[in-house]
Amino acid sequence: MDDVDRKILAELQRDGRLTLTELAERVRLSISPCHRRLRALERSGAITGYHARLDAGALGLTFEALVFVTMRYEDRETVAAFEQALAEIPNVLQAQRLFGDPDYLLRVVARDLAAYRRLYDERLATLPGVQRLSSTLVMKSVVETRPLPL
C-alpha cells in the first residue's frame, strides 16, 4: 500500500458515495488506474464494504448502553454459542471480546428504558454461559465513528 492507496482510502472514508470519476480527480489519477487500485483494495480486504451511516436518534433508538459481560464458562463451545446467539440480536451494534474481566463489552441501542429492560431480561441475560451483566448508560457520544488514521 502506497500513498496513493492511502489517499483513495481517506477519500472513501470521508465520502463512500464518490463516483469513480470524482475519486480519480481527488487523488489525481486517471479513471482506469484509480479503478484498478480501488478493486485491488477491495480484493485485499482493506475495503470491506460501503455503508450509509444512520442517526439512531432520528430512527427512534434514543437509549444506548454499554454492557459488560462476565462469562460463567469460557470453554470453546460455550463461547461459540454465546457469540453466535449474540450475533442474532440486532440491538447489539458492537461486541468485543476482552482480555481480563469482564469478558465482553457490548454496545446496545433500544427505543427507551422499557425496551432496554425487556432486551436485557429476555435476550441478554439468557445468552449461553453468562454469569453476570453490568450496564453503563451512555450520556452523550463525544466521538462517533471516525475514519481510521492512515
Image (tube, rainbow, N blue to C red):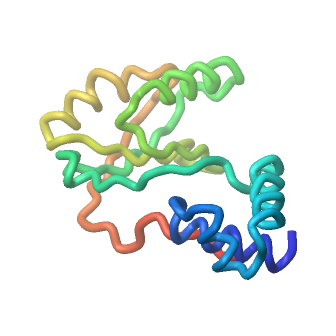
Residue 28 location in percent, x, y?
73, 81
To which quarter of the image does residue 21 belong? Answer: bottom right
Is residue 133 placed above or below 17 in the rendered structure?
above
Is residue 34 placed above or below 122 in the rendered structure?
below
2 with respect to 13 (left or right):
right
Residue 96 location in percent, x, y?
56, 46
Is residue 86 placed above or below 150 in the rendered structure?
above
At a point 41% along the width and 38% down the height, the residue shown is 92
29 with respect to 78 (left or right):
right
At a point 57% along the width and 28% down the height, the residue shown is 83
Q: Quadrant of the N terminus?
A: bottom right
To which quarter of the image does residue 134 belong? Answer: top left
115 with respect to 141 (left or right):
left
Q: How many marks?
A: 0
Q: Quadrant of the C terminus?
A: bottom right
Q: Nearer the viewer, residue 84 or 1?
A: 1
Q: Nearer the viewer, residue 48 or 22?
A: 22
At a point 76% along the width and 59% down the height, the residue shown is 35
To which quarter of the image does residue 148 belong? Answer: bottom right
108 with respect to 106 (left or right):
left
Q: Nearer the viewer, residue 19 or 150?
A: 19
Residue 129 location in percent, x, y?
52, 23
Residue 38 location in percent, x, y?
75, 59
Q: Nearer the viewer, residue 15 or 127?
A: 15
